[in-house]
Amino acid sequence: MVKKSKTRKTTKKLVKNSKKAKNKSIIKNKRSVKVLKKAPNKKLKSSVGVKQKTVAKATKRPIEKPEEPKINREELTKKLQQIEREEISRLNSVLQDSYARQLLIDLAGENSLEIVRNFRGNPSDEDIAKKLKIKISDVRATLNKLHSAGLVNYFRDKDNETGWYSYSWNLNRSKIQNWVEESIQDKHKEFLESGDHYFCVECGLESIKPFESATEVKFKCHSCDKDLEFLDVEKLNELIKLKKQ
């Protein structure tokens, strides 16, 4: 009986040992499988990380800007001089009209025509006074009146040593042309608002008469004996344009 119990015990131990061995081998196999599963994932992650880094580097690269065309200063100065010459010629054509000249004189005084005609670049008031031999106080008074109408602009520069300001001036030639046209229209409106006027289509500006004079001649032109017509702003402007031509 003792022998049988010993053999049973030994068999039980052998079974337990065999089960433990199997369990250990299974655990080892599982671990190896896990390792095998993890290994390719790590490689994938590392490759993805490398791609992401390369993309990030690519995005961080500065964008190449197109080269700006080089400015030729000589050509630029020539263009500016050409523009100034064209503006001067247009202004001179405007100032050929005696009425336009009178408008400038009424605005800024007798020196305004000479200053406007001889204006070049961005001179100071002292430069203008020396060039035209006019008192600097008169030059400043004229420039201030022209500035009030927006016909000239000024640039102010401070001397850090003395604390004094120096002024350089710029003539707005295109603005002068518009201002003259607007002023003429305003004068025409004032003229027509003072009372009714009549004119002869054939004889033009010289035939304009106020209502009282037109009634005396029975609304007939004294030159060609044609009927006088009522004068409004549009017709007056047309007559002035025809006279200029």
Image (tube, helix red, strand yellow):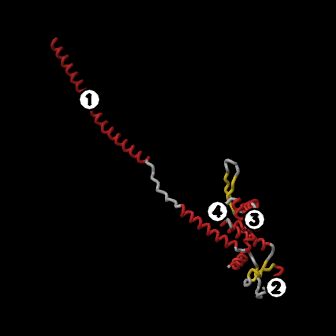
Mark 3 touches mark 2? (CB < 8 Å): no
Residue located beneath label 1 in the image: 28
Residue located beneath label 3 in the image: 108
| Label 3 vs label 2, nearer the camera | 3
In terms of depth relative to the viewer, which is nearer, 207 or 148?
A: 148
| Label 3 vs label 1, nearer the camera | 3
Residue 221: x %, y % from top left: 78, 85
| Label 1: which secondary element | helix
Q: Alpha-carbon neighbours of circle 2 within 10 Å: few (<14), some, or many (≥20)?
A: few
Mark 1 touches mark 2? (CB < 8 Å): no
Q: For the residues marked 4 and 2, what is the alpha-carbon distance in whole angstroms? A: 57 Å
Q: Amino acid at mark 3?
A: Ala
Q: For the residues marked 3 and 2, what is the alpha-carbon distance in whole angstroms? A: 43 Å
Q: For the residues marked 1 and 2, what is the alpha-carbon distance in whole angstroms? A: 132 Å
Q: Alpha-carbon neighbours of circle 4 within 10 Å: few (<14), some, or many (≥20)?
A: few
Residue 199: x %, y % from top left: 76, 81
Residue 60: x %, y % from top left: 44, 46
Among the two numbered marks 1 and 2 on one chain, the one whose residue lies closer to the N terminus: 1
| Label 2: which secondary element | loop
User: Relative to residue 35, is residue 123 drawn left or right?
Assistant: right
Among the two numbered marks 3 and 1 on one chain, the one whose residue lies closer to the N terminus: 1
Residue located beneath label 4 in the image: 121
Among the two numbered marks 4 and 2 on one chain, the one whose residue lies closer to the N terminus: 4
Residue located beneath label 2 in the image: 218
Q: Quadrant of residue 203?
A: bottom right
Seen at 35% across and 40% down, the residue is 46
